Amino acid sequence: MAETTPHVLIFPFPIQGHINSMLKLAEVLCISGISVTFVNTQRNHSRHLTFTDVQSRFGGFPRFCFEAIPDGLSDQPHSSGFSSFPDFLGLLDRVEKFMKPGFRELLTSNHRFRSDARGPVSCIIADGILGFAIDVAHELGIPSISFRTISACGALCYLCLPKLINNGEIPFKDEDMDRLIKNVPGMENFLRCRDLPSFCRAKDANDPNLNFVITETSYSTRATAHILNTFEEIEAPIISRLRSSYWPNLYTVGPLNALLSTLRRSSSTNSSSSSSVSVSSNASLYEEDRSCMTWLDKQPEKSVVYVSFGSLAMVSREQWLELWYGLVNSSYRFLWVRRPDSLTDKDNEKSQMSAELIEATKERGYMVEWAPQEEVLNHPAVGAFLTHSGWNSTLESMVAGVPMICWPHSAEQPVNSRYVSEVWKTGMDMKDNCNRSTVEKFVRDMMDGDKRQELMKSTTKVSQMAQQSSSISCNGSSYRNYEALLDFIRKSC
Ligand code: UDX
């Protein structure tokens, strides 16, 4: 009897950071011969096709397909549809209201899938913040895997939130920001109140955003298995804690960009199939401005600070200017991604800019609205990354061996930046402090001198570990975990 090919349905929360990592997993599974349906929202679906080469990237996989469902955001003015949404919970409510029926409808009309060669969906990999997807999977008797797009250290902090509330560690007062947190196991010596996920800064334990995170995190424990985009070599103690206390079937398969490169290489050696197409790894919802690559080509090696705050972070005009002055005053070159939807206030920037600032920027700066980030980080001219510590950006920087200056913005980013500076030692943490003199000092320290030498040693080591974890010949941990995940998926069909 012919063996059935599993059919995995992947369902990300419809924002760039989540789509990027889940689409990489989709490609990895396709290379391994699994049938994949990737659920986009209608809005993102058309943006993908406009701005990216997903067609050519997935064109060689006849068992891959996109499905699009409504997300109720088509009337939002900005490109991502999210930064314009003032309140996170309102956004989530709206997304769930529109997406849940569309998702259920897609699965209950599974006969559509039956009639194509790929057969019905045998396993759902849903974003960990889409708890309703796990409900629908349960309802329909389909095994579900929850994919959290965050770090293991961030995930553990989320899981410990009820304990932190019960023990009176949160909420905390502003003057307690530097107090050490005692109830996140393994982090007692370095995690301060200011390093906790941003939701913990709520003044009230009943804060709706805080409660949403707690509920959604506890929900995810109901999935049959879990995936994290991280690797044992940097987060082993936390990963084993997560396995023993919360998620027994946890597969850590990251960094997914490294695993994807490994599998692309291996499939191009083993066959002449078009799955080996060499394309940029991200599927941007924004239009990439590739002129920055030409600009980088003209800069000396390791001379440029790349500045980017992901797809969601918004800053005030004042913070913007402080950052700008800090960069210019450091005298180093910089490439800065300034998304058009990233300012919280709209007053006139020009009135606050000196001629000197503008001149200096023309001389040694370059600005784009969206960059091909992974390519930028791997360009020889890039010497450091000033980042908001989003988990994808952190991993991409680690793989490329670029040290980071962290200015965390929200969610679990403050935990990531603490790990970068205190545990992995691959960067420095500006945490809560972005005035021009701090930026200038951090950039100078990062780009030159003893501090840089020290950081480069550990950054290079972490980069090697990241590559090894996904290597087939080294039998790396993420590669082995990926094989175990494949087994799990095959057994579930
Ligand atoms: C958020 C959270 O920050 C992150 O921690 C969580 O796990 C996922 O959602 P975001 O804030 O957008 O995502 O940051 P990040 O995780 O770093 O993802 C941004 C992605 O956009 C990265 O893959 C990055 O390569 C890409 N990007 C960013 C570009 O391709 N071009 C750019 O100009 C900027």
Image: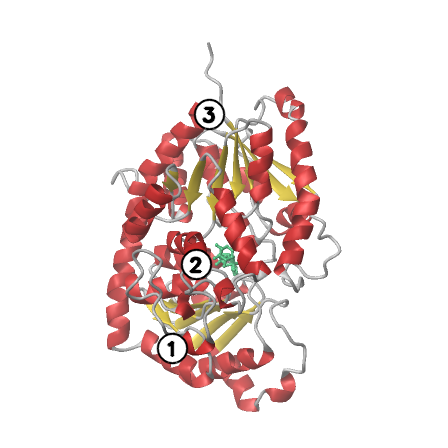
Mark 2 crowd level (few <14, some 14–19, many ≥20, 10 Å Cα)? few
Q: Position of residue 238 (x, y in %)?
A: 32, 51
Q: Residues within 10 Å of mark 3 (few under 14, many from 20)?
A: some
**Residue at the spot of label 3:** 492
Q: Compared with residue 97, is residue 109 higher up or lower down, i.e. above or below?
A: above
Q: Earlier in the sequence, mark 2 or mark 3?
A: 2
User: Which disc number belongs to residue 443?
Assistant: 1
Q: Of callouts 3 and 1, which one flags the residue occurring earlier in the amino acid sequence?
A: 1
Mark 2 touches mark 3? (CB < 8 Å): no
Assign a secondary structure to mark 3: loop
Contact, CB < 8 Å: mark 3 with mark 1? no
Callout 2: helix, strand or loop?
helix
Q: Are marks 1 and 2 in contact (CB under 8 Å)?
A: no
Q: Residue at x 32, y 55 (%)?
A: 185
Residue at image mark 2: 166
For the residues marked 1 and 2, what is the alpha-carbon distance in whole angstroms? 40 Å
Is residue 276 left or right of 93 when viewed as pictured?
left
Q: For residue 58, what is the image quadrant? A: top right
- Answer with left or right where residue 43 lies relative to residue 448: right
- Residue type of the residue flagged with mark 1: Val
Q: Secondary structure at mark 1?
A: helix
Whole-angstrom CA distance, mark 2 to mark 3, is 38 Å
Q: Position of residue 387 (x, y in %)?
A: 45, 67
Residue visible at 54% across and 79% down in the picture: 319
> Which mark is first along the chain, 2 or 1?
2
Q: Position of residue 197 (x, y in %)?
A: 46, 62
Residue 441 x, y percent position in the rendering: 37, 82
